[in-house]
Image (cartoon, grey):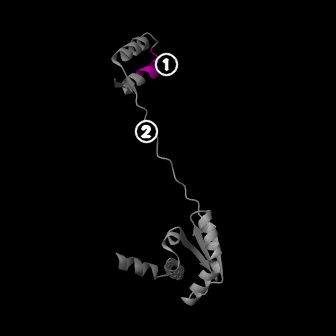
């Protein structure tokens, strides 16, 4: 399967350029990780390179500020690794953390409460929305 993908990726000019660009980004990422402390390296990533401008994504404002401070040194280190970079742009990547869904409320009714609600709901008209809601509440509640 891998050979088929490699053959497909090498078959066209556009795909060949894409493959070369992806390989260049991987090399830039490796050099970046090599020259940064582990905590900083895990909080940023190479996003793109165009001509001699490298775009880095930072996982927060503090990381972005630190990367901007050391950008000239990083550019020199990329140049020493054979990858000429003149400008480094740093962009803050917004990471959305979604809240965990709230657990369903614990619906516990005593036996007397269930009977009382059942008696009341049976006294309501059959097509009453309140009766339907009460019956759903009774069905979904646990005996307490």
Where residue 17 sits, quadrant-wise, is bottom right
Q: Which dot marks residue 72?
A: none
The x and y percentages for residue 35 are 52, 80
Q: Secondary structure at mark 2?
A: loop
Give the distance between the C-alpha atoms of the residues marked 1 and 2, in whole angstroms.
25 Å
The x and y percentages for residue 95 are 55, 58
3 is within the stretch colored magenta: no
Q: Are marks 1 and 2 in contact (CB under 8 Å)?
A: no
Crowd class of label 2 (few under 14; some 14 to 19; many from 20; radius 10 Å): few
Q: Residue at x 33, y 17 (%)?
A: 111
Residue toward you, 19 or 92: 92
Where residue 138 sits, quadrant-wise, is top left
Q: Secondary structure at mark 1?
A: helix
The x and y percentages for residue 71 are 63, 78
Q: Tell me the quadrant of the picture where the N terminus can be found.
A: bottom left
Mainly helix, strand or loop, the magenta region? helix
133 is within the stretch colored magenta: yes
Q: Can residue 87 be seen by looking at this rendering?
A: yes
The residue indicated by pointer 1 is: 130
The x and y percentages for residue 40 are 53, 70
Magenta stretch bounds: 126-135
Drawn side of residue 35 relative to residue 55, left or right: left
The residue indicated by pointer 2 is: 103
Q: How many marks?
A: 2
């Amino acid at each position: 399967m891998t050979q088929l993908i490699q053959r497909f990726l090498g078959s066209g000019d556009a795909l060949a350029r894409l493959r070369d660009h992806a390989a260049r980004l991987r090399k830039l990422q490796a050099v970046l990780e090599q020259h940064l402390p582990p905590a900083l390296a895990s909080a940023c990533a190479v996003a793109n390179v165009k001509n001699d401008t490298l775009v880095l994504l930072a996982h927060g404002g503090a990381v972005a500020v630190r990367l901007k401070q050391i950008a000239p040194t990083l550019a020199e280190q990329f140049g020493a690794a054979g990858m000429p970079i003149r400008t480094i742009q740093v962009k803050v990547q917004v990471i959305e953390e979604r809240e965990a869904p709230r657990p369903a409320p614990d619906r516990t009714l005593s036996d007397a409460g269930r009977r009382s609600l059942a008696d009341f709901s049976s006294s309501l008209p059959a097509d009453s929305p309140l009766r339907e809601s009460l019956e759903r509440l009774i069905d979904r509640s646990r005996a307490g």
